[in-house]
Amino acid sequence: MPKVTIDGVTIEVPNGTTILEAARMIGPEVAPPTMCYYSKLKTSGGYCRTCLVKVSQGSEKDPRPMPKPVASCRTQVMDGMVVENNTSQEIQEARAGVVEFLLVNHPLDCPVCDQAGECHLQDLGYEHGKSETRFEFPRREFERKDIGDKIQLHMNRCILCYRCVKTADQVTDCRVHGVMNRGEVAEISTYIEKSIDNDFSGNVIDVCPVGALTDKTFRFQSRVWFTKPVDAHRNCDKCCGKVRLWYKGNEVLRVTARKDQWGEVESYDGKTGWICNTCRFDKKTTADWTIEGPSKISRHSVISANHYNSLKALKASIDRQKEALPHGEKVTLGHGALDPNNEIK
């Protein structure tokens, strides 16, 4: 098994492992950012170049450095390889240039965009972006489109990461959208203005790293940092049934797949946890679900601010009161009444 050193940390990895995968095995402190790579989707990666790294030693047999920065999501580890990511000033400058390109046409929609607080480009722009742009030409503009009864496409915000196309191609049974045209006029669109309509079409919303594909049932209802994500499950004959419910008070504002620390859909028993449209759009009451408890959200995320300790205390208080109250009586706490018959485990 080859050994690779990334930002001074050495790890042994299986043959065929990419630099990005090896860095993720070490941890987020050395893992390069990604916008197009998605480990659950075949052939993803290699488009956005945000995961660039510097290979200062190619291998033990050939210690010469690679002449240019390489995309870590597409470059396999070799034994004795030495990689610089956060420790390389050259890479930080190159990444800032990539972010500048990504933001050439991306509008400043953060104040009105539903993806704010969950946007990978927002995080990337904060960490590596510049305060000014050198782009002086008119930005490209597109009309917003409803590409399904519950999905809206904001092409102005799209960075052409291809995730939604690959999701539709590999997860759904009938892909009707893709990338039209070439160059700066390339856009995501449906074929002959068709509507996306299949049981797993909602997953294109989950994989979009920006606010280009949004859930029409959640649009403008709340900022994510005012909601409380809770893990839940149900017996579903179409999908895994394991989801994240986003509460505001006692109301479920939206349902999404559960995501890991890399922003990707979690896997269960070796299978990716894609969820069906029935779970996503039609099951929005607490009674539809078995509640497991508060979701684990990274502490650096704005979503985790202020309410997680109180949510844990709420769960403990509900458990205590459920034991003391007669069957069917309601526990009134915080924003309203919760039914003790809805299992909170």
Image (cartoon, rainbow, N blue to C red):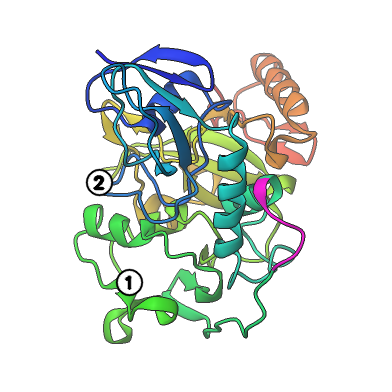
Separation of residues labelled 2 and 1 (CA atoms): 21 Å
Q: Magenta stretch?
A: 128-133
> Is residue 21 highlighted in magenta?
no
Vertically, is 294 above or below 10?
below
**Helix, strand or loop status at disc 2:** loop
Q: Is residue 251 visible?
A: no
The residue depicted at 33 percent of the width and 37 percent of the height is: 235
Pick whichever, 22 or 38, lies toward us. Answer: 22
Tag 1 secondary structure: loop
Q: Which residue is mark 2?
A: 42
Residue type at mark 2?
A: Lys
| Residue in view at x 36 percent, y 28 percent | 64
Label 2 crowd (10 A; few <14 / some 14-19 / many >=20)? few
Magenta stretch mostly in which secondary structure?
loop
Q: Which residue is mark 1?
A: 196
Give the answer, above or below, for where 320 lies relative to 45. above
Magenta-drawn stretch contains 132: yes
Residue located farthest toward the left when viewing the structure as drawn: 173
Depth order, front residue of 24/214: 24
Of label 2 and label 1, which has the lower sequence position? Answer: 2
Image quadrant assignment for residue 282: bottom left
Is residue 39 among the parts visible in the rendering?
Answer: yes
Going 61% across and 32% down the picture, which residue do you hit? 297
Q: Residues within 10 Å of mark 1 (few under 14, many from 20)?
A: many
Q: Quadrant of residue 30?
A: top right
| Coordinates of residue 111 in the picture (x, y in percent) | 75, 64
Q: Is residue 242 left or right of residue 122?
A: left
Give the quarter of the image for residue 140: bottom right
Taking depth in this image into account, of 277 and 32 the one nearest to the observer is 32
Position of the C terminus, as image quadrant, is top right
